[in-house]
Amino acid sequence: MLSKRFLLAVLVGAAMVLAALLALVAWRAMSGDPEPVRFDPAEFVAPRPKLDAPYVATDYEVVDAMLAMAEVRPNDFVVDLGSGDGRILIAAARSHGARGLGVDIDPARIREARANAGSAGVTHRVDFRRQDLFETPLGEADVVTLYLTEEVNRRLRPRILSQMRPGARVVSHDFGMGEWRPDARQRIGTATLHLWIVPARVEGRWRLTVDGRDHALQLDQLFQQVEGRIAGPGGPVRVEQGRLRGRRIRFIADLGEGPRAFEGRVTDGRIEPLAADAGWRAVRAG
Ligand SMILES: C[S@@+](CC[C@H](N)C(=O)[O-])C[C@H]1O[C@@H](n2cnc3c(N)ncnc32)[C@H](O)[C@@H]1O
């Protein structure tokens, strides 16, 4: 036989459980259903930047060859477009005493490059910035380094030609720049390096004075190649084998006394001969 006291305890316990359940139901009814938990990975992972070239680091041996090919000198300002882990500029600063700016669209690469520059002790010489390489100004650069794609190099070409000063150098790992043929090429293992020297602009009309006589000179230019004609005493004369290397120009013309080589330097609307006694000079006429 169950005792009365035990039955009472069971009844009181059951009543308390029932009261708790009722309170819970009432609370759920008042507060409504809780919001389902949402997980949106985009809130936790930053969107991947759109890359115009994938990240592949240049081998250190090739980095050294690129810097040697561009003849990087102390205090040269080197810009690496798509700078990855920063190795090209860090080597330029450590081995050549250069200054540098690296831009990359991927913030992870910028963090990595800054950390590497810190470990290498060159943060006072190099800077890394998150930026689209198509928006990076190039006017201050003595040297631009590239490891991108041929298509990206082609798209960069007008910026290089219009912004970089004559004589500035561009070196590219593996990829060319379309119709703009490099001034030099070099193989390093399986890699090919391309070097361009930004040419002065000489296209247009000049007044060429040779041995005291003035001639109209018309120059046409395709990158570093130059053609043209001179209004000579006996009729038009072709400008042949014309070539620019930065500000240096060379061409051959026969003004009636046999082929003559004209070698000069282009500065501010003038072409001055390299040899002081060369007997010619040219001044821009349009
Ligand atoms: C082949 S890696 C070269 C890395 C480094 N210059 C080297 O040679 O070791 C190309 C780099 O370009 C960066 N990149 C791609 N598109 C870019 C853009 N539009 N603007 C800036 N950087 C870009 C990539 O994130 C990558 O780090």
Image (cartoon, helix red, strand yellow):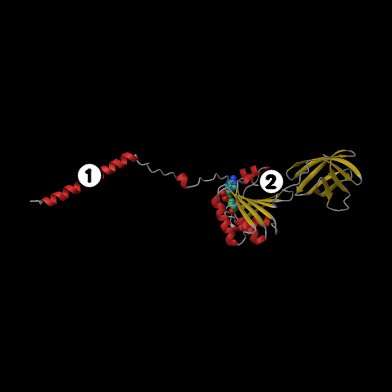
Marks 1 and 2 sit apart, C-alpha to C-alpha, by: 81 Å
Q: x, y percentage for residue 101? A: 64, 53
Q: x, y percentage for residue 72? A: 69, 57
93 in relation to 154, above or below: below
Residue 172 in sight: no
**Dot placed on the residue nearer the N-terminal end, 1 or 2:** 1
Looking at the image, how many numbered discs can be counted on the residues?
Answer: 2
Q: Quadrant of residue 282?
A: top right
Q: x, y percentage for residue 14? A: 19, 47
Neighbours of disc 1 within 10 Å: few (<14), some (14-19), many (20+): few
User: In the visual, does 171 lie left or right of 108?
Assistant: right
Q: x, y percentage for residue 179? A: 68, 42
Residue 156 in sight: yes
User: In the visual, does 238 lie left or right of 171?
Assistant: right
Going by the numbered disc 2, the residue's amino acid type is Ile
Residue, disc 2: 160
Which residue of the protein is positioned furthest toward the right in this rendering?
A: 212
Residue, disc 1: 18
Confirm or reject: label 1 Cβ below 8 Å from ligand 1. no
Q: Quadrant of residue 177?
A: top right
* Secondary element at tag 2: helix
Which residue of the protein is positioned furthest toward the top in this rendering?
A: 235
Neighbours of disc 2 within 10 Å: few (<14), some (14-19), many (20+): many
Q: Quadrant of residue 236?
A: top right
Going by the numbered disc 1, the residue's amino acid type is Leu
* Secondary element at tag 1: helix
Query: Is 116 in front, or is 43?
Result: 43
Q: Which quadrant of the rendered structure holds the C terminus?
A: top right
Q: Residue at x 22, y 47 (%)?
A: 16
